[in-house]
Image (cartoon, rainbow, N blue to C red):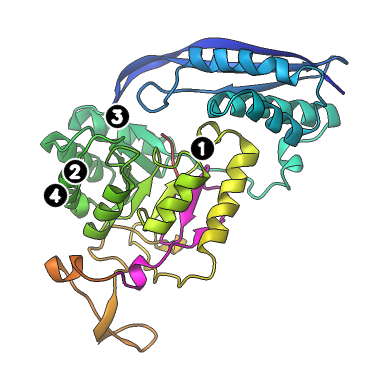
Amino acid sequence: MRIAAVEPIVVDVPLRTPVHGVHGMTAVQRSLLVRVETETGFEGWGNVDPTPGYSPVSAEQVHASVRAMAPALLGADAFNLNAAIAGMDRAMTDASEAKAAIEMALVDLKARALGLPVHALLGGRVKDAITLNAWIGTVAPEQAAREACAWCERGFRTAKIKISGATDEGVERVAAVRAAVGTRMALRVDFNESLTVDEAITFIPRLEPHALTLVEQPIPRHDLAGLARIRRRIDIPLMADESVSDPAALVEIIRREAADLVKLKVMKQGGLLRTRAMVECGGGRARGRPRPRIRPHPLDARRGGRRGGERGGDRRVRGGGASQNGRRRRRRSGPARRGRDPSPRHARPRCDHRPGRAQALSCRSLTRGGSA
């Protein structure tokens, strides 16, 4: 079965109401669809949604990249994904978003032709239901509280709150949401690269009273040394998202111990197969390292994951005080803790392959993934 056509299509999807994020207001989602058709008439569809400010390319640029790679795919075996990926790599070195859309269409085509669900081609279903995060933008605290209550009434139990910069309003937004939902929802914060390192170190502790699950990408994506420095100075789990651009970046984040969690996305990583390969890459890189001690957060104790609501979390070093296994330990804070050599808390993260984490690779201090 040979590929006869590769067609990119830009689609504008109006939103019910505009959303306000760190990178501005959005009223229309401009997406890129890819249709792949064989000479026998089978077709498959792929889709990516580049976001201005977050994604390095626009939907129009992804459209151009798909058109540029299409000739390398015409006449190729539609079922041979590895050959298709190699052909795209020869045609263009980057273009992860375009490659993801084309690969998704090829996987969809193969599943349709064989009469199988896509998960059957990827090893089988691992979860019957996937929970999603509610999304609260950079809105006034009162509006954020109303939106959180509405999400909660719809059954959502986790919400991501956007904060742009180190502002009092950002703290007030998180406080208002926590006051509105109480313990009914787990909360996380996403800065989308809007802080400096020094701002992050002084600002993030102001959010600790509100029992956050994690804070996401506080500083620009390429500053991995800065991420590592922040992680050593805060007591809320730190997630890297924009920083996780490719396998090399993932390995470097693990090597530097720069995050507690990392988020993978099919669009960002260049396709389903490459996303799964990065999960295995991270797992192999971290395998065999000491596993950090994990204490459940009171908001989510049944899941047994580490949370940031209790100051200090699982950060323990050898010394006085008793631990569960009978060894003597004591907790440090302030300059003494900040200046110490890496302890078991900062051992190389181990990767958690639990299903249903929405393209998130947990580096076991890790627990959650989420949306952009």
Q: Which residue is disc 3 drawn over?
A: 137
Q: Which mark is residue 265?
A: 1
Q: Which residue is disc 4 drawn over?
A: 202
Q: Is residue 87 above or below residue 319?
A: above
The magenta-colored residue range is 342-365
Q: Which mark is residue 175?
A: 2
- Does any portion of residue 253 appear in the rendered image? yes
Classify residue 38 by image quadrant: top right
- 2 vs 1, front mark: 1
The disc labelled 3 sits on which kind of residue?
A: Gly
Give coordinates of residue 70: x percent, y percent. 68, 16
The disc labelled 4 sits on which kind of residue?
A: Thr
* Element under disc 2: helix
Label 2 or label 4, whichever comes before in sequence order: 2
Label 3 to label 2, Cα distance in Å? 14 Å
* Labels 1 and 3 touching (C-beta < 8 A): no
